[in-house]
Image (cartoon, rainbow, N blue to C red):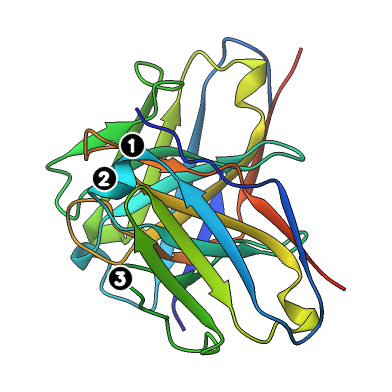
Amino acid sequence: EVQLVESGGGLVQPGRSLRLSCAASGFTFDDYAMHWVRQAPGKGLEWVSHITWNSGSLAYADSVKGRFTISRDNAKNSLYLQMNSLRPEDTALYYCAKDLRRSSPYAMDVWGQGTTVTVSS
Amino acid sequence: SSELTQDPAVSVALGQTVRITCQGDSLRSYYASWYQQKPRQAPVLVVSGKNNRPSGIPDRFSGSSSGNTASLTITGAQADDEADYYCNSRDSSGDHVVFGGGTKLTVL
């Protein structure tokens, strides 16, 4: 079964850091690009970041650029999101999603169930 | 980055056909993909590319595009289709991804 399982969310104070993880199974992880997508409570989907199959190209939404870092470990079938200098507006459910392609972003055909990040003092 | 615009809400009578649209400059260069999200569930891809449905998605879902507008058509809407629908695509730079604001579909 193709599956993505996120972890690492929690309650954190503004300005602090958090690292999200996404464990992939049921497919050849290093054949596909990956994304992080978030959804604030009661709001729509917001793309956060994208990484190609070999980590050769990374991209970030303007809202997180310079604060968040996406990475992957193909040997561990895992995707990560290092989130620094967190702000209250980063509060959201964070989804890990698999792309249909290896490189340029195309479409997200597999999604995890998400991990919740709450930034509050 | 460019934006994708969707109508916030659309309704359709049971068994009728409904079209959900997504507008944006980047759609002149890139295909849109469409996602269905039901309450408290993760999004599900329903259409990608020119008009490709993942395995398990009913053929009543179809996609099309013209100019700066992409459309998701549900032919013979079912009660189970009631959900939020989001489009996405690359933005004009080609390196970033953008989502539309979502359309809440009500099946009457």
Image vertical order of residue B18 relative to residue B32, above or below: below
In this rendering, do the residues under marks 1 and 2 share a single chain?
A: yes
Q: Which element is circle 3 on?
A: loop
- What amino acid is labelled 1 in the image? Ile
Residue appearing at x 26%, y 45% in the figure: A51
Residue A70: assigned label = 1
Of all chains, the one bearing label 3 is B
Residue appearing at x 42%, y 30% in the figure: A82
**In the visual, does B42 lie left or right of A18?**
right
Residue A51: assigned label = 2
- What amino acid is labelled 2 in the image? Ile
Q: Which element is circle 2 on?
A: strand
- What amino acid is labelled 3 in the image? Lys
Residue A114: assigned label = none
Q: Which residue is mark 3?
A: B50
The answer to whether residue A111 of the structure is visible from this angle is no
Q: Earlier in the sequence, mark 1 or mark 2?
A: 2
The answer to whether residue B59 of the structure is visible from this angle is yes
